[in-house]
Image (cartoon, rainbow, N blue to C red):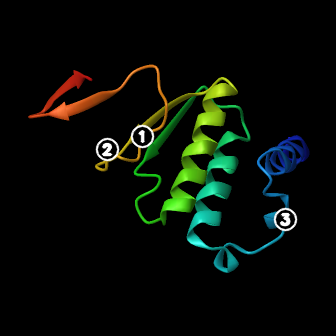
Amino acid sequence: GWRGRRARAMELLEYFDLSHLAYRMPNTLSGGERQRVAIVRALVNNPRLVLADEPTSSLDDENARLVLNLLEEANRMGATVVVTTTDLSEKMPSDRDYILRDGVLVRM
């Protein structure tokens, strides 16, 4: 139920050192904080698959690294994480990398 999800959310916020943001309104959070909290929110139900479309596109370098670290940890927790990006410098360690070249998905 909702109590279990709330407890799981608090557990994840603490795990990712974001518990200080638990009771803040979204409009008071920075872009990086919003992005990290959104990822934690997505992990509450222990998804097997996390799709992250341009998760760092509007973030500075420091917050981009924090978001990628969070996604890496989600993968270590058992989720398959698929990240799409147009900036190949925003790469996180992965088992497989692909690039879309001329409409064809090619393994790198």
Residue sitting at x 76%, y 48%: 16
C-alpha separation, residue under disc 3 versus residue under disc 2: 32 Å
Q: Position of residue 85 (x, y in %)?
A: 34, 46
Contact between marks 1 and 3 (CB within 8 A): the answer is no
The residue pinned by badge 2 equals 88
Contact between marks 2 and 1 (CB within 8 A): the answer is yes
The amino acid on which the numbered mark 3 sits, given as a three-letter code, is His
Mark 1 surroundings within 10 Å by alpha-carbon count, few (fewer than 14), some (14 through 19), many (20 or more): few
Vertical order, 48 against 44 (above or below): above
C-alpha separation, residue under disc 1 versus residue under disc 3: 28 Å
- Residue 20, numbered circle: 3
Label 1: which secondary element:
loop
Tell whether 54 sits left or right of 29.
Answer: left
Vertical order, 94 against 9 (above or below): above
Q: Closer to the N terminus: mark 1 or mark 3?
A: 3
Q: Position of residue 54 (x, y in %)?
A: 40, 51
Contact between marks 3 and 2 (CB within 8 A): the answer is no
The amino acid on which the numbered mark 2 sits, given as a three-letter code, is Leu
Question: Which of the 4 quarters of the picture holds residue 91?
Answer: top left
Tell whether 35 sits left or right of 25.
Answer: left
The residue pinned by badge 1 equals 91
The amino acid on which the numbered mark 1 sits, given as a three-letter code, is Lys
